[in-house]
Image: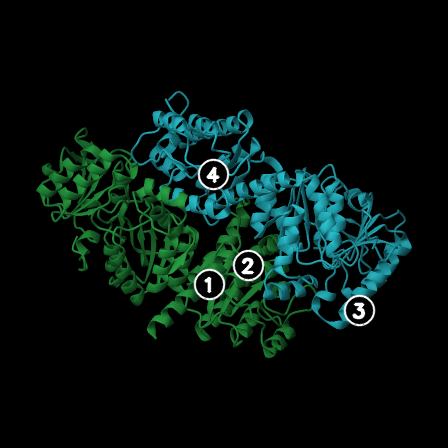
Chain colours: A cyan, B green
Amino acid sequence: MKAEQIRQLDHVFYPSTVAVIGASDDDGFSQALLSTKLSDSVFLVNPRRSELHGRRCYTTILDIEEEIDYVVIAVPALNVPGVLAECIAKGVKTAHVFSAGFSETGLEDRKALEDEVKETARGRIDLIGPNCMGIQCPGSGLAFIPDASSEEGPVGVISQSGTFAEQFLSTGKLRNIRFSKVVSYGNAVDLDCPDFLEYLAHDSRTGVIALYMEGTRNGERLKAAMSEASRLKPVVALKGGITEHGRRAASSHTGSLAGAPEIWSSLFRQTGVVQVESFDELRDAALALSCAPLPEGDGAAIITNSGGFSVLETDLCVKAGLEVPQFTEATKAELSKMIPLAGTSISNPLDAWPIYYNLPGTPGTLADAIGVLAHDANIHSIVLHFDEVSYLRRVLGEAVEGLLRELIKVMVQGCKYARDEVGKTVMVCVALDAYSEDEEDRRYHLMAKKAFEDEGFPVYPALNDAIKAVFNLYRYSIARRTRLV
Amino acid sequence: MKAEQIRQLDHVFYPSTVAVIGASDDDGFSQALLSTKLSDSVFLVNPRRSELHGRRCYTTILDIEEEIDYVVIAVPALNVPGVLAECIAKGVKTAHVFSAGFSETGLEDRKALEDEVKETARGRIDLIGPNCMGIQCPGSGLAFIPDASSEEGPVGVISQSGTFAEQFLSTGKLRNIRFSKVVSYGNAVDLDCPDFLEYLAHDSRTGVIALYMEGTRNGERLKAAMSEASRLKPVVALKGGITEHGRRAASSHTGSLAGAPEIWSSLFRQTGVVQVESFDELRDAALALSCAPLPEGDGAAIITNSGGFSVLETDLCVKAGLEVPQFTEATKAELSKMIPLAGTSISNPLDAWPIYYNLPGTPGTLADAIGVLAHDANIHSIVLHFDEVSYLRRVLGEAVEGLLRELIKVMVQGCKYARDEVGKTVMVCVALDAYSEDEEDRRYHLMAKKAFEDEGFPVYPALNDAIKAVFNLYRYSIARRTRLV
């Protein structure tokens, strides 16, 4: 490895031609690549087939006349060195080895096989993997998931786990996240996390980097790459294997030496990388960092229709490290004019259920209340909780759809004012249970979600998720300020 | 209050006649009560209406000829003392005051109003509230949510927050939770948490008690009630307002004095009550405690199709206080016979994706693997992660539905063997995102969920939730053993 030097990886992410070695009727790589704009430049290799997916299938890569920039190798582990040698003979620039069955098995002969792959590749071909999903790059058409969005966006993902790379793409689509590049790098015998991190740090199409890793072979290089990347853009990271048992699991997953948790926490802190604790938190933070302005302080306002949630979410904010400050007297006076006394709380959290139903033209709408909060000097971010669909359906019956559209417009308008005119961070929770079975109920919720997303707001199904996202935005703003000093 | 004496509340939960004072076209109480078996014994009162919901509407409760056992009072706060006096004159046994606008406002005159309500009721009528949803009791028909399940079940809920009582009922329906009684008790000027706790402790229809509270006026009595209840059945509790800001929010929600968090934690520990940290965890623990056998130790096995989740969920288990022990050599040898090497991990967590697709008749099915794990002496509970639907749909196309049914049968069979024949705790995660929009995908997931639920397994949409539920079962088993010594 070229230790201190940034590897130029444009050819890795933007190949002109791709071959899948070990293509079959149901392999996801062929299906994915054939569904993107690269489709016409995809070649399939399988010695047992002459045709696949309606096109010619080659016996070996050497039989393809065209130059091949990038190969996906999906053959049994023991065949990988031979196939790799053929790719090198063919002049392929990049090989992604999907095949598993190497050092992660814990078996000596499989470690030796991995070393053989590493030695074969060294200096002759750029290698991703083995034991990984490779690269999804909407800008070039490289893909490992067939039905992911082809739209480019600001989020770059580097994941040692193939599942999490896939989960980013599949659930990201549901959460309005668009990606610049998603990398699953597995056992990392050649191209490793720092290489991808350096590349994405300088990639103008990437605005935020989300990182999942289980270990590293070169801590110093990783530290330098993290430090450089987080100086240029937000980097949020999840470290797998922070407990002893978890490290054992990491070792059988990607063959990683995982290291003590304190070392990792301190590494993240020193390099300005925001460390999170679960996959959902990683994805949710990436979404927030990709579209919301950073809060200028730790004061959060919560607007909800529930006293119980007011109490618990305040606890959660404070445990997380945010404040839920009292509103100024001026704010309270303004709010008192529009919110009735009984069953509400003109305080922070604002439990203001009666005005959730006020339409434009009535004395106080939710947009008016949000506008008042936005100007409170103690408040730097606003979390809006929307969980009114079943109530509205019950009291409104068939009129609900039209009124709901109006109410959503009012809420979106208030949030836009707070963000665009006053500069506050605004997050939205459109509360929805994963197992909800009422299709009409789901449709209304998704309608609300889409209305907020269309205006660029991050939307979460649980209030906790929205609050954690605010907190991670705040942590990044602190990390950035500290490093700029 | 009759301090040291258990209040007999059968008449509170099982009235023969109910009146709603302040009934209207869209009040939830009338709608709820008119949809239950109490319907013919429900009387509506509203001086401005002669008819409501197709039946006679009375001017005052005194105009009703029949005896009234229970009233719901939903009138403006200032009218409550007068209405309450009429109820007492009428000989009503129990009054539930829904109306808000009392001590929770923080206003002196409203505190005085609450005191007036308290004095009016004292010794003359049992009073629930004010500022609460009251009681849902499928066994009697008492209800505050119109579309909740009318089926009785083992979970009893006591909640200071109305929203959480509602959320228990609405999301409990989606999670296969059935309730004996759900109580929202609000400002608790008369009937308080200890009264309900003592009653549910001795209620033969209640098998598990879930508690949400923000504070208490009588710590000693609460302690005695918790201690007694948790000696008789599992009690799991969520305390709102454990931070300073949270206590302020609690004060404006239910007028509670919330107390220092350490005092509460120690109270829960001393009384054998399992304390949890979020509403979802409370509900999820109640589900697990209502249907799963207790684990006999801290050793958890995780079966998944993802290496990344293996690592993170192991971290989560260990952070929570569970072990993810290595399997015995005998277990590993058995598993090695059925699970291929590449891309799997024959270790705990068991990352065994290839055998997720094996149908009966093939050498190793998931049922076989679960059977092997169940007999491992290090393993006390098993968490099965199912997240295969999109993969199966991609590789199987139209054949997916039939095959999926078969695979689900295999999984359920394995889980039943582990639980019923070997006595292990088994939890299932059927992974589903709240915002998933693909209706067919959702249908398949819900089909799997239902198959497990029909056999009495707790099912959760996220692996984290299932693990936390195992942990809370384990904590309860420890608390119980400790107290039995």
Q: Amino acid at mark 3?
A: Ala
Residue under numbered circle 1:
B471
* Nearer to us: label 4 or label 3: 3
- Mark 2 or mark 1, earlier in chain: 2
B333 to B456, vertically: above or below: below
Residue under numbered circle 4:
A445
Q: Alpha carbon of mark 1 to alpha carbon of mark 4: how far?
A: 32 Å
Q: Alpha carbon of mark 2 to alpha carbon of mark 1: how far?
A: 20 Å
Residue under numbered circle 3:
A112
Residue under numbered circle 2:
B386
Task: Tell me the subunit letter for badge 2.
Answer: B
Label disc, if present, on residue A220 of the rendered structure: none
Is disc 2 surrounded by few (<14), some (14 to 19) or many (20+) residues within 10 Å? many
Q: Alpha carbon of mark 4 to alpha carbon of mark 3: how far?
A: 54 Å
Badge 4 and badge 3 in a common chain: yes
Viewer-nearest residue: B174 or A184: A184
Res B485 → quadrant: bottom left
Is residue B152 left or right of A323 when viewed as pictured? Answer: left
Is residue B256 left or right of A162 when viewed as pictured? Answer: left
Query: Where in the figure is residue A291, as x and y percent of width and height?
Result: 60, 35
